[in-house]
Image (cartoon, rainbow, N blue to C red):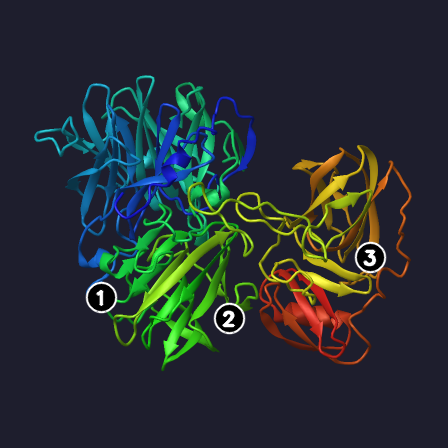
Amino acid sequence: MGLFSKMAKSAVVLAAFAVVNSAAVKVNNPIMYVDSPDPSIVRVDDAYYMVTTTMHFAPGVPVFKSTDLAQWRTVGYAYQTLANNDQQNLNGGKDAYGKGSWASSIRYHKGFFYVLTPSYTTGKTHLYKTADVESGQWSEVQLPFYHDPSLFFDDDGTVWVFYGSGDQISYVQLNDDASGVKAGGRSGKLGGVSVNQATGKSGYIVQQEGSHMEKVNGEYYLFTISWPNGSCRTEVVYRSKNLLSGYTGRVFLSDNGVAQGGIFDTPDGKWYALLFRDSGPVGRMSHLVPMEWKDGWPVPTSGSKAPSTIDLPESPLPGYGMVTSDDFESGELALEWQFNHNPDNKNWSLSANPGYFRITTGRTDSRVVNAKNTLTQRSFGPKSSGRTLVDGKGMKDGDMAGLVALQDDKGFVALAKDGGNYKVVMYSGNKDGERLVTSENLSDSKVYLRIDFDLPIDRGTAYFYYSTDGSSWKKIGNDVKLNYDLHMFVGVRWGLFNFATKQAGGYADFDWFKVGTDVNDEIYLDGAGSEPVPQTPFCAAGENCPANAIPGKIEAENFDVPGKGKDGSSYYDGDSENHGDSDYRKGTGVDLYKKATGVIVGYNSEGDWLEYTVNVKEAGDYTMFAAVAAAGSTSSFKLSLDGKDITEEIAVPAASSGEENYDDYNKVKANVKLPEGEHVLRFTVVGSWLDIDYFTFVKGADAKDPEPIEPIGIANAVRYGVQGAQVYRVYSLNGAFVGRIDAMNSVDVRSKVNSLVKESGVYLVKSLTTGTSHRLSVTK
């Protein structure tokens, strides 16, 4: 594999991934919350091999392997260099953004793997072949350009490509050894294939493309994607007893845009379709759709819907097996890395300064998108964080080296050398250019840089930070609203870069790259570096902390210290910022507030969770009491132990004042059964917007609360203020200043905030007169 490490190979032998003997795990769709477009899949014995679209990255056409359909790893690439031209090399003002190689097809035939991929850069279709997909050499044959091709080996020894777009699909016959187009072979349009007839539509955003040909029980099945006007991306299937004619078609699936892909079976006879969905800035994500056969037609088992969850033998790997932290201690790059365009191999190194990834500038550039040797990894959702430590002692004046959120709407945070001094800078921009947002002076040539991604379905935001010590992070510049655009045509990625604006020859050294769900998480896939570190109990002493004793009281802010790697997180928060006024747990993204009784956890929204290591003295019945506050009537939570629910959803009463008041606390309770010994207790928010102060566990069912709350609440109820005008500052939940209002009372505050903001959501309203803060829910 050239300069890329094969260290994943031993991990993806996956002896532990035994499908037959594993118990079912409920896995969310998409099965990979990561950019994995145009998937093509083939099963060889008990292993599955998948390829996805590459576009302008190198090496290209990544091959992923799994034995359980949940845990995937990169095992190789079909090519190191698609073409050695100005577009792929970022030379002469040219690029291959949105081009490179597109939808690919993977097949296995008589001991060889084949990958077929078309390129809008070369104008060719490239057919790669190898006997060993993980470590063997690939041969290449170039064919004419075929849009979205499907390679097909028939039982009679003939070889075909099905391709094209429009109402019909074309075919061409190859030599029997797939060495080229067969002289005198057959070509034309498939008889009976008409998307207009299959869908009953005549107007389309995309009429038809994305061919996948399969043969099952002697019949031929062609799968395509269509996007009719007024509908969503739709998967269509045609069937015939003859390869080239006699097809009839109908809709296979039309649900939320999940479409384009093929079908396959498992060793135990189950059938699936592997399709994808356009999902905004994170990219196009793969979905697994269980299916069955009815009257010779493939149909989704779930009916007309793509299921939100499926049962698989294992849970996905951290980062869906598509990303890894890297300490650059190896002499080769991990397979999860891809360069943005072809690398300039003489100007990057892992050996010039062992333990560092070095980029040397070979020319001057005006934009980060033109910089050579930018090293990228995919983002993943719904939340992810990437950070690095860059040393710029070898930089020249005008150089910038750092971390980029690479997409058309982009931003980067970088170390810049200016007049012999070092600065940290933040830039934002789009496909037409970037601009300096802010810069701050540094006293050293080293700086830690970080980008966090918030990637809910169909939306995305990037947040930028820097640190001088690696633990205290400072936000810098603007948040960048991400946008999936056809210019680059890929999901947003992290990229390590260095480019010169004045003089070539400078270099920057990247010590490491850490990636995880948040700033405390470090995903190291097997063979890729550090061993996972488990979470541990927290206490004020900081070290050798005991588990929380049950029976007893657990302060909500004393959630476990996060570990590193798989299953190392001890909390999940909607973003990586602490929007509270307490730095009690500095370095975490949990929102902590000072109250009369101490520190509480606030801003809790749906899906947030906290974990606590507990030690139950003896098994039996207990009563759980929780001190909680909510401003509305829809807030709720539940508790689980070692991953199993021990309570149903517990409603949190609204503030008795009826206002957006989180100082009016109540007690809720539930009877629970607990086993003896050490366990992990998880508090999960089900209904948004509640605060939690503490839990108390008392032995016995329906026990008496040892610490009842007085009617006035934990703190004196705080109202929006006295009569008379006050000035308030309004912030979004990510801390961005929205605007300023003058208001007379709480009714006036609500009215003016509603007029000020543009989107529905929860906003922080802070009085400049009293200093008190309140959260206000706005529906537009």
Question: Which numbered disc covers residue 476?
Answer: 2
Of callouts 1 and 3, the N-terminal one: 1
Nearer the observer, 345 or 155:
345
Calculate the distance from the C-alpha at mark 2 to the C-alpha at mark 1.
31 Å
Mark 1 in CB contact with mark 3 (< 8 angstroms): no
* Residue ID at (89%, 52%): 708
Q: Where is residue 654 in the image (x, y as percent from the top left)?
A: 79, 55
Residue 357 visible to an observer of this rendering:
yes
Calculate the distance from the C-alpha at mark 3 to the C-alpha at mark 2.
36 Å
Instruction: Examine the image and state in which quarter residue 9 appears.
Output: top left
Nearer the observer, 768 or 293:
768
352 lies left or right of 405: left
SS category of the residue bearing label 1: loop
SS category of the residue bearing label 3: loop
Q: In which quarter of the image is the N terminus?
A: top left
Residue holding disc 3: 665
448 lies left or right of 716: left
* Residue ID at (30%, 74%): 501
Q: In which quarter of the image is the C terminus?
A: bottom right
Of callouts 3 and 2, the N-terminal one: 2
Residue holding disc 1: 93
Residue 407 visible to an observer of this rendering:
no
Question: Which numbered disc covers residue 745?
Answer: none
Q: Position of residue 598 (x, y in %)?
A: 79, 62
